[in-house]
Amino acid sequence: MPQVFSSGANTLAKLSLITAAILPFGVLYAGSTFTRSSANTNVGVAVDQPVFFSHKHHAFELGIDCRYCHTSVEKSPVAGVPPTETCMSCHSQIWLNSPLLEPLRQSYETGESLVWNKVNKVPEFVYFNHSIHIARGVSCNECHGAVTKMQMTAKGRDLSMSWCLECHRNPEKYLYVEGEEGRGASPAERVFELYDKQRRGEQLSTREFNLLNDKTTVPTAEQVRNGEQQVERLGVKKQQLMDCWICHR
């Protein structure tokens, strides 16, 4: 009887079996890599806006307080974007003829609001309250990255569920403590004092330096203990932070 398969058939069969075994894992790995990449999360990808705006120039170089533009961040779930009138409080006097600001001037003259493109967005089924995080002493940079270094604003974190849960499981690692390494009397004041210290060129703690430069901080045992005491003082119920309804209402 003539030979049906060539001498390399055994090798081909083995390679096929190995490929079939490895391929599912390769597909899963590729999918996981893609979902965590900036191509999917848009982390670090600058978003085009109707008017060019530099947080680095306004918040750091000029020293404008975050709350001058984001007026509701301490009292509302939404931080808010400034109306045209806020921008024109300065730009009715400076950079009057800049072509970059033409859309701003047209908005002011016509009364038609600028439509800013959202940078940080969570799904519709997720509830997030800016004011409660500020009141507890969570730095803006924890969620938004090194905003004061951004010429063009980009998403600083992937805002995934697992990322949020890390903070909800261990809030003591992320809260400012009253009077900790600064003059602020409350956690909320400490949040904004960070940017004042940066502008004044004052010495920064390791945590503050890392926050401003988008680096990871590993808190010391003492800092964790202080954070745990702060959690207790503020009445934060850690177990409740893990309830689904906290974010899904």
Image: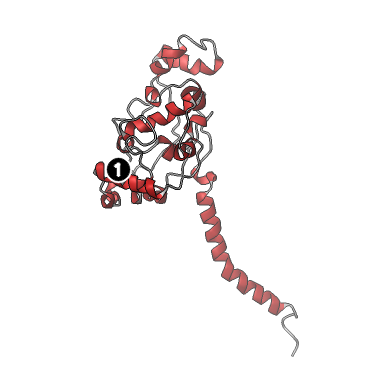
**x then y, percent, for residue 78:** 33, 32
| Residue 116 seen anywhere in this rendered image of the structure | no
Name the residue furthest bottom.
Answer: 1
Badge 1: how crowded within 10 Å, few (<14), some, or many (20+)? many
The image shows a total of numbered marks equal to 1
**x then y, percent, for residue 32:** 51, 55
Q: Residue at x 38, y 22 (%)?
A: 68
Residue beneath label 1, please?
Answer: 230
Quarter holding the N terminus is bottom right
Which residue type carries mark 1?
Answer: Gln
Is 143 in front, or is 247? 143
State whether residue 111 is above or below residue 48: above
Q: Residue at x 53, y 37 (%)?
A: 45
State whether residue 93 is above or below residue 181: above
Q: How is the image coloured?
A: secondary structure
**x then y, percent, for residue 104:** 46, 17
Left or right placement of residue 98 versus residue 220 in this view: right
Q: Residue at x 69, y 74 (%)?
A: 12
| Residue 138 seen anywhere in this rendered image of the structure | yes
**x then y, percent, for residue 113:** 40, 21
State whether residue 211 is above or below residue 151: below
Is 207 in front, or is 52? 207
Is 174 in front, or is 17? 174
Which element is circle 1 on? helix
Left or right placement of residue 75 versus residue 123 in this view: left
Quarter holding the C terminus is top left
